[in-house]
Amino acid sequence: MRLPKIRVPMSPRSGLSTLRELLPGRKAEIAARLVCAGHRPHPSKFAEAGLSLSPVEEQQLAAWWDDGLSTRVADEVAARDGTIRMVLDLTDGERVEAVAMPVGAVCVSTQVGCAVGCRFCASGLFGVRRNLTADEIVEQVVHARRRLPIDRVVFMGMGEPTHNLDTVLTAIARIKDEAQIGARRQTLSTVGSVRAFERMAAAPVRPCLALSLHLADDARRRELLPRAYKEPIAEIVAAANAYGREVGTPVQIEWTLLAGVNDGDEAIDALCALLQGVRCYVNFIVWNPVDGMPFAAPARDRIVEIVRRVKRANILATIRDSSGPDADAACGQLRLRHHEMPAVPPAG
Ligand code: SF4
């Protein structure tokens, strides 16, 4: 019997999608699922997974397994709570972060750097250098699963996902098929855009939505998030609500708490007024200090008081304070170790 024609990947670091060049149709699909499951199975388990390989294919898959991913973990730091922050090397020498969490979630990056430039975020300090490919996004799930059991993906790492939306939606569909993590267990976090929400609503695989709001006043938000979309906040929130209702999941509103910036009664009352009638919950994020940035998190008592105030307005609210300062917990902070720190502009 003649073996099917097999081609080896174009380069030893060419990415998860090159399994399709290595193996024919269905075999490539099953192999991708095995890779995305995390740990390498013994060849005796291939048949159990429905993968029947010729000796040549088996050899080539073994070689691919050792060297086929396009990304490498260059650095990783484990926090006391078990969170693992990884810096990944990309083929062109760029670096991004991914964070595997013991709660079963991985936080993935979608771009190298970020163009939005939120004044409290380390990822936006250098602007955006390029978009990630779908392979580079999906492989972050693979690296996380090689370390922890992962069944949730949050697109909250480096980058603004809607600036790379087609690729991110492709990655979401592939994570569903290859990593077997459904759309309801994937959350795309964005500063928000009406047009992006419309495109997401029309996509074949639709993730849950997290809207990074941080302030409910247009002018002040523009100072804090200088290159976010310019649409009025009320329109962005209305479009997010429409998307959430269409998909059938509440919108997560993210609010990074910054003392003296957005933790006062006035700012919180404006948030509550904005969210009346919106199917959502608020996730208050306790800011992790970044060297040189002129911000501080509010005191613990004040955070508890804020959550009570929001709940009194009949809006669900939670506090996120999980990864801690011992693992360079702020977004983009681990990658900063590999760069010189630029001057930070003062917050508006
Ligand atoms: S918080 Fe998100 S959108 Fe803002 S600069 Fe950082 S990565 Fe970009």
Image: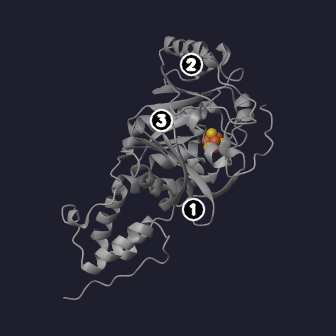
In the rendered view of the protein, which quadrant contains the C terminus?
Answer: top right
Q: What amino acid is labelled 1 in the image?
A: Leu
So how many labels did they put on this image? 3
The residue at the point 18 percent across, 88 percent down is 1
Note whether residue 338 is visible: yes
What is the spatial separation of the Cα atoms under label 1 and label 3, in whole angstroms? Answer: 37 Å
Against 327, is 54 above or below? below
Q: Which residue is mark 2?
A: 272
Which amino acid is tagged 2? Answer: Cys
Give amino acid for label 3: Ala
Residue 66: percent from the left, percent from the top?
A: 41, 67
Mark 2 nearby-residue class (10 Å; few <14, some 14–19, many ≥20)? some
Q: Nearer the viewer, residue 292 or 225?
A: 292
State which quadrant residue 129 falls in.
bottom right
**Number of residues whose C-alpha sits closer than 10 Å to that of mark 1, classed few (under 14), some (14–19) or many (20 or more):** some
- For ligand 1, tell me if the residue under mark 3 lies within 8 Å: no
Which residue in the structure is indicated by mark 1? Answer: 90
The answer to whether marks 1 and 2 mark residues whose Cβ atoms lie closer than 8 Å is no
Front position in the image: 39 or 227: 39
- In this picture the colour scheme is one colour
**Nearer to me, 208 or 257:** 257
Secondary structure found at label 2 = helix
Viewer-side label of 2, 3: 2
Residue 164 placement: quadrant = bottom right
Residue 55 placement, left or right of 341: left
Element at label 3: helix
Task: Find residue 341 and report its horizontal and vertical position in percent.
Answer: 75, 46
Q: Which label's residue is closer to the chain start, 1 or 3?
A: 1
- The residue to which callout 3 is attached is 242
Q: Is residue 123 left or right of residue 323?
A: right
